[in-house]
Image (cartoon, rainbow, N blue to C red):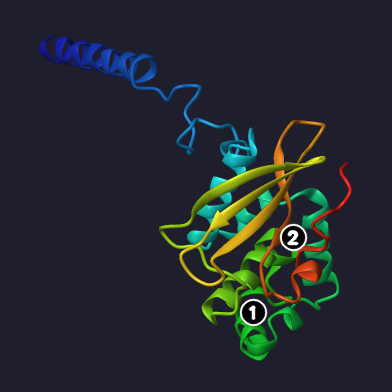
Amino acid sequence: MKKSINAALLLILIGIISFILFNFIKPSETDSIYKNNARTYYEAIDFSTPESTSLAFISAWRSADYITFYILLHPDTQQALIHKAFYRLDILPFFPEKSTEIDETLKQTANMSNIESILDLNLYLDYLFNAARQHDALPFKLGEDARIDTVIKDDQQIIVTIKTDSQPQEISLYLKKLEINGRWKISYIQVPEFPSQSLLWGHAPNNEPN
């Protein structure tokens, strides 16, 4: 009799615990791994204004997050970069002083046997830019004091000037708004005294709007 009561009490206790777990401690339907509860990584980025995209660019470049940097680029610029970096493999001459070192580092992380970098091309681009960063070959640096300086409207584009805390002292982002979803994307990055920039970013700064 006593054993039956104990068993019944145990079942009741298990039922109470299960009820609490499923009704009070269960994950919310809006739970997300992103701070703003975005559904996807892409939607976690604020593209709503030229300034918000520019701030995301500063943060991504500063933290060597070149996957986010790639996502911030205009689709035409993404296509140009991927075409040069992966399909033609001719982006290394844009870092002439350190091209050999960058190539060796890239082979260790993004060689053709790395299935991830073959299927996910922005990951390959991340490997490339990170290799350039490791060998101090990137065209500009953005430290803690980097900030938006001016915002200028130029026909169908917005030009955002960013003050850096190194050389060059400023760079300019050319942003265009995608008509299909209203996102502001970077179509060109103007870097003073960087001779390969038009080839690297794929477009001239006065490129035509969509």
Question: Picture quarter containing residue 51?
Answer: top right
Other residues around mark 1 within 10 Å, as few (<14) / some (14–19) / many (≥20): some
Q: How many marks?
A: 2
Residue at the spot 76% in from the left edge and 31% down from the top edge: 181
When the figure is inspected, residue 112 is found, relative to residue 188, above or below; the finding is: below
Q: Quadrant of the N terminus?
A: top left
| Image location of residue 175, percent across then percent down | 72, 46
Q: Quadrant of the C terminus?
A: top right
Residue placed most toward the observer, 121 or 206 = 206
Q: Is residue 41 visible?
A: no
**Mark 2 / mark 1, whichever is N-terminal:** 1
Quick check: marks 2 and 1 in contact, CB under 8 Å? no
Is residue 52 found left or right of 183 in the rendered image? Answer: left
Question: Picture quarter containing residue 39?
Answer: top right
Of badges 2 and 1, nearer the viewer stands: 1
| Image location of residue 24, percent across then percent down | 34, 16
Give the labeled residue for mark 2. 119
Q: Amino acid at mark 1?
A: Leu
